[in-house]
Image: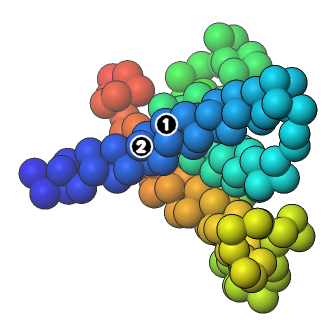
Amino acid sequence: MLIKRFNKHFVNIAEVIGVLSIIALALALFSGVIARYVFSISIPEIEVVRKLCVTWLVFIGSALAIKDKQHLEVDIFSEYMSKASARIKDIVVWALTLFAVVILLFIGIAAFQAGLDRRELVPISFLSFRPSLTYYYAALLFGAIFMLYFHLLNAKKVFSKVERGLDDE
């Protein structure tokens, strides 16, 4: 029961981050268009918000796609394969995806650490300093963590004989 509640909260956190990113991106794009075409001014800070929202949206969206098993699926010739061959294919694809997500996790850790030392290039008028790029690179790290978690949750679907209909063999 505790694990199901944790899973639900973990999914909710990812979905909230995704929704907030979409809303912030839409508001940034809308305000940028209004500022440029109605008031004939450009607000450089909006570009920072747009980059941030897109970055978070890509990595959190990828994690949510992995959760629903919509991110990577190899189904070429699956209808022509036996159930045992299809199961082996699913296991191989799951293992390769796990390998890729683990690599992404290590890259995310390195990027997060590198972001601590880098500063935003666009000056933000209401700040006296240029902020760290950690908030960009954190998307890669947190997205990889969410991807790994959701991918490991999908393991029981891949390795379960009963769910795959292989209990008769």
Colour scheme of the rendered structure: rainbow
The C terminus appears in which quarter of the rendering? top left
C-alpha separation, residue under disc 1 versus residue under disc 2: 5 Å
Which residue position holds label 1?
19
Which residue position holds label 2?
16
> In the image as oriented, which residue stretches furthest toward the bottom?
117
Side of 131 relative to 23 (left or right): right
Q: Please tell me which residue is depicted at 69% across the width and 21% down the height of the picture.
A: 75
| Quarter of the figure with residue 162 | top left
Q: Residues within 10 Å of mark 1 (few under 14, many from 20)?
A: some
Tell me if label 1 and label 2 are in contact, CB under 8 Å: yes
Dot 1: element? helix
Of residue 133 and residue 165, the one placed in the foreground of this image is 133
- Residue type at mark 2 is Val
Dot 2: element? helix
Side of 131 relative to 123 (left or right): left
Task: Give the percent coordinates (x, y) of residue 66.
Answer: 55, 40
Asked whether residue 130 appears in the rendered view, the answer is yes
